[in-house]
Structure formats: structure tokens, C-alpha cells
Image (cartoon, rainbow, N blue to C red):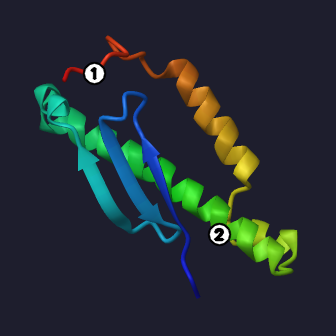
Amino acid sequence: MIESTAWAATRTDSVRVQATSGGVPTSVHIDSRELRFGGTELAKTILEVHARATQSAMARHRTRLERDGMPADVLDRLGLPRESTVADAENELLGTEPAPVSWMKSL
């Protein structure tokens, strides 16, 4: 079985995580600016971004299985989310996640 992978990031793109549909993180990027918030807050952010990446990878996996002919009720029982559900959750998060202090990046 080929696992799907997906990236997720904070709104400021300062923490990015790639994860498989099985929940295995395959890559993590942490901007040095995130270190100012301390270990506990950084760990919380990494875990939240990881969970979003995993959900996106699971949705991609579902799409591929649907395309290959697997019935939707089986995919539902497997707990694989639909891409639209994941997109709705991301859009809702954008409304609650604080905006960056500045859209400009320092050079």
C-alpha cells in the first residue's frame, strides 16, 4: 500500500510539518522565530500542525482509493475524511488563528 503524504503549516509558515496518512511525521521545519515562545507552546504548535497534515494526507488517501473504486461506505468505516471536510476545518481555523504581526519577512 502506498501511503499519501501532505504538508500543513501555521498561518505565518513558521512551523511546517509533512506527515503520512498513517500519522508518521516525515519532515518538520521550525523557523527560529518560534523559539521565543518556549518549548511547551512550540510543542503544542507542532502537534497541532502535525494533526492537520495527517488529516490532509488521510483525505488524499481516501480520494485515491475512491478513484480506484473503493465504496464510500467502506472508506467512511475506515475513518478516512473527505477532502471537503478537511478544507472546511482549515478554513475555520483561519478564522480563529491569530494573524501574523507583519506580512513582511525580514531579509
Above or below for 103 versus 79: above
Q: Which sits in the foreground, 106 or 9?
A: 106
Residue 46 point in image, percent of width and height: 31, 45
As measured in the structure, the alpha-carbon distance from the residue carrying label 1 to the one carrying label 2 is 34 Å
Q: Position of residue 52 (x, y in %)?
A: 50, 48
Location of residue 36 in the rendering, given as x and y in whole percent from the top left corner: 12, 26
Q: Nearer the viewer, residue 84 or 7?
A: 7
Identified at 71% across, 52% down, the residue is: 83
Q: Looking at the rendering, which quadrant does residue 66 occupy?
A: bottom right
Crowding at mark 1 (Cα within 10 Å: few <14, some 14-19, many 20+): few
80 left or right of 103 in image:
right
Q: Quadrant of the C terminus?
A: top left
Secondary structure of the residue carrying tag 2 is: helix
Q: Which circle marks residue 46 in the picture?
A: none
Quarter of the picture holding the N terminus: bottom right
Label 2, residues with CA under 10 Å away: few <14, some 14-19, many ≥20: many
Q: Is residue 49 visible?
A: yes
Q: Residue at x 56, y 55 (%)?
A: 55
Residue reaching furthest bottom?
1
Mark 1 touches mark 2? (CB < 8 Å): no
Instruction: Tell whether 60 sits left or right of 102.
Output: right
Q: Which residue is mark 1?
A: 105
Is 59 rendered above or below residue 97?
below
Question: In the rendered image, is residue 77 in sight?
Answer: no
- Which residue is located at x 26 percent, y 49 percent? 29
Which quadrant of the structure image shows residue 98?
Answer: top left
Q: Which residue is denoted by mark 2 in the rendering?
A: 61
